[in-house]
Image (cartoon, rainbow, N blue to C red):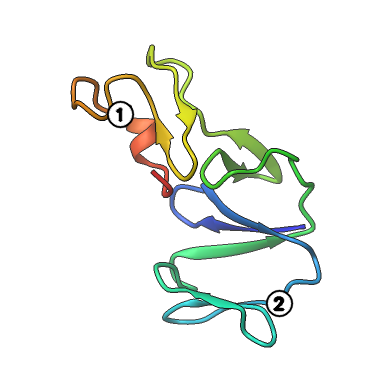
Amino acid sequence: MKTLINKTTKTALYLWEDLEFIELKEDLIVVGSPVKYHIGDLASSTAELIEDVVDPTDFICAKYKYIDGEWVNNHPTDDGVTYTWDKDHWTWKGRNDGTKPPSEQWKASDCN
């Protein structure tokens, strides 16, 4: 497997099979050959492709960080909030009505 991470936060954003073609360009990321899609909000300056990673089996964008060859849970556990994945984003009690802001750790993720 291979994963694409944010260089600054180390948040894992995508996970692909080893054979998938990924090209980091100066202005975007190209996926597939022939091209299947472009990732326009990342580029070679902001993302890093790491190959030969183990599939965590429950991968979801921003659920993990990839640090020093290890998957690290990116779920805040020390701020008193229970975070859940809701189709395409993290959510928690109080998010929608603005009564509970996200933790600093959650704000560092890229798929919120």
- Please indicate whether residue 34 sits to the left or right of residue 12 in the image: right
35 and 74: which one is in front? 35
Residue 102 numbered tag: 1
Q: Quadrant of residue 19?
A: bottom right
The correct choice, above or below, for 91 with respect to 24 in the image is above
Residue 25 circle label: none
Q: Quadrant of the C terminus?
A: top left
Q: Which residue is at the far front?
A: 87
Question: Element at badge 1?
Answer: loop
User: The residue under label 1 is which amino acid type?
Assistant: Pro
Above-or-below relation of 38 to 16: below
Neighbourhood count class around disc 2 (C-alpha, 10 Å): few under 14, some 14–19, many 20 upward: some
Amino acid carrying mark 2 in the image: Phe
Q: From the viewer's perspective, is 96 left or right of 23?
A: left
Task: Tell me what residue is drawn at x 37 percent, y 24 percent.
Answer: 92
Residue drawn at the location 74% of the way across and 72% of the way down: 20
